[in-house]
Image (cartoon, rainbow, N blue to C red):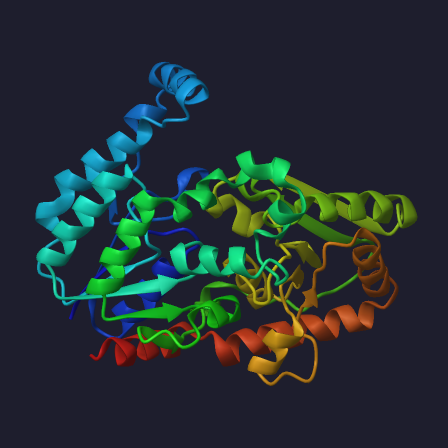
Amino acid sequence: MRILLLGEYSRLHNTLKEGLLALGHEVIIAASGDGFKQYPVDYSIEAKWSHTKLVNIFRQIIFSITKFDIGKIETGIRFYLLLPKLKGFDIVQLINESPITTLKSWELLLLKKIIQNNNKLFLLSTGVDYLNVNYWFNHKEEKSILKPLFENPSLQKEYQYILEYQTKQHKKIHDFIYQNCQGIIATDVDYLVPLKGNPKFLGLIPNPINYAKLNYQELTIENKIVIFLGINQWSYYQKGIRYFEKALEIIQEKYKDNVEIIVVKNIPYSDYINLYNKAHILLDQMHGHDQGYNALEAMAKGKVVFTNASSEFEKYYDLDKKIAIHAEPNVYYLVAQLSFLIENPKELIAMSKRARDFIEGEHDYLKIAENYLKTWGI
């Protein structure tokens, strides 16, 4: 079967591709690579010309005045030029409702072309889309990446790219995709409730992890416990990074002779995945129920991760022991959890083993690929 995966923001589609190839299918990824993360793609739609030094100066000036990014025009043109190569696929899967990330009117036009030239269309619910954002706005009391905005409306600028999913222009895209797709697949527990009762919902398929590529090393603590924090400035508030930073300040002072803290910012995925190799603890995110891709890969390596791992998540997977630390937007809670692990290294080592076992049991990329094929009707 020929399968086209549109968009990539986490390595989900890359790992799914690895599983599908192993099962004998032809797979193509068309995406931008997601900015500085530079995820591998087969057909790139990255706005390279708009990011050259000279052009980028004018691009930034225009954006600061009008909030319009000319890079979106280049992305749309690059995708349009690729259309002759994006025909005849049995399955097309969208990473979200705006996988091309061009102008809204162009996005709709280009997605119409994709549907006209291919067979079945499926949509992933794995981040921001119309249904999720709409649900979170109507249930502000629940955990979501919008929680910081609800508590502090002055952060609206930081959430602009998410708020676009509530505009009339995007609603047209959502309606078109919804009417023409064969179904919507959730990738973790956070997206179950917004899709509950939706006739297009096909169920939850966990994120695929190729753990054979992620060497597990049993944690050893010879001197200091190493804590790693990787910061993406564009999701700083959504992931609760400010709470981690404040907690680390206290931990550094409290255990200055017993810990080493590593903080990095906006680095390519290929560098990021290796920079935390010597870490014992990785600080990922909060404001949700289930782990994202960074957390899962770190867990596969045997790191103890502070991330989304709520009671709802534990109930879904029927867990009786912690495989990660559920992070909360509370500095003193985070300090207490970190302090416990620093002072109880045996629990740190035990949780590391449980994390790897969980990934092998629930996120095996070959089993996940088979699940996708079954859900797609192949």
Q: Is residue 184 visible?
A: yes
Report x, y in % for residue 324.
67, 68
Report x, y in % for residue 349.
74, 71
Name the residue: 58% across, 58% down.
144
Name the residue: 28% across, 40% down.
104
Q: Is residue 272 left or right of residue 151?
A: left
Specify the quadrant of the image occupied by residue 47: top left
Name the residue: 88% across, 45% down.
256
The quarter in which the C terminus is drawn is: bottom left
Front-lying residue, 60 or 12: 60
Front-lying residue, 229 or 239: 239
Q: Is residue 19 left or right of residue 282?
A: left
Q: Is residue 37 visible?
A: no
The quarter in which the N terminus is drawn is: bottom left
Q: Considering only vertical position in the picture, is 253 above or below 193? A: above
Name the residue: 34% across, 49% down.
40
